[in-house]
Amino acid sequence: MSKNPATARTRRWASVKEAAAYLGCSTRTVENRIAAGWLPRYKNGHLVLVDLDDVDAMITRTAQRR
């Protein structure tokens, strides 16, 4: 990651529940995507987080396959 503040990316963290609401799907679907390796997850203690930029990238990759 770049140390230059002008090029540094701000992460948009979301819980699995928040990511599911963002996608309009169930939390189980988000968990399945994480388990399948389609969506990276980050742990902060017991809290599992996803970056919404990763969610957007997953959607784009999925749409391009169709």
Image (cartoon, rainbow, N blue to C red):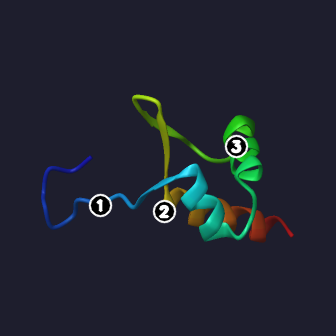
- Label 1 neighbourhood size at 10 Å, few (<14), some (14-19), many (20+)? few
The residue where tag 2 is placed is 53
Asked which quadrant contains residue 64, the reply is: bottom right
In this rendering, would 48 be left or right of 34? left
Residue at 53%, 56% in the rendered image: 54
In this rendering, would 33 be left or right of 15? right
User: Residue type at mark 1?
Assistant: Arg
Q: Residue furthest top?
A: 45
Q: What number is the disc on residue 9?
A: 1
Mark 2 or 1, nearer chain start = 1
> Which label lies toward us, 2 or 3?
3
Mark 3 or 1, nearer chain start = 1
- Label 2 neighbourhood size at 10 Å, few (<14), some (14-19), many (20+)? few
Confirm whether residue 45 shows in the render: yes
Alpha carbon of mark 2 to alpha carbon of mark 3: how far?
17 Å
Label 2 close to label 1 by CB (< 8 Å)? yes
Q: Is residue 8 above or below residue 37?
A: below
Q: What number is the disc on residue 31?
A: 3
Question: Total label count?
Answer: 3
Q: Is residue 45 above or below residue 10?
A: above
Foreground of the two, 11 or 48: 48
Q: What number is the disc on residue 57?
A: none
User: Residue type at mark 3?
Assistant: Glu
Residue at 46%, 30% in the rendered image: 46
Q: Position of residue 47 (x, y in %)?
A: 46, 37
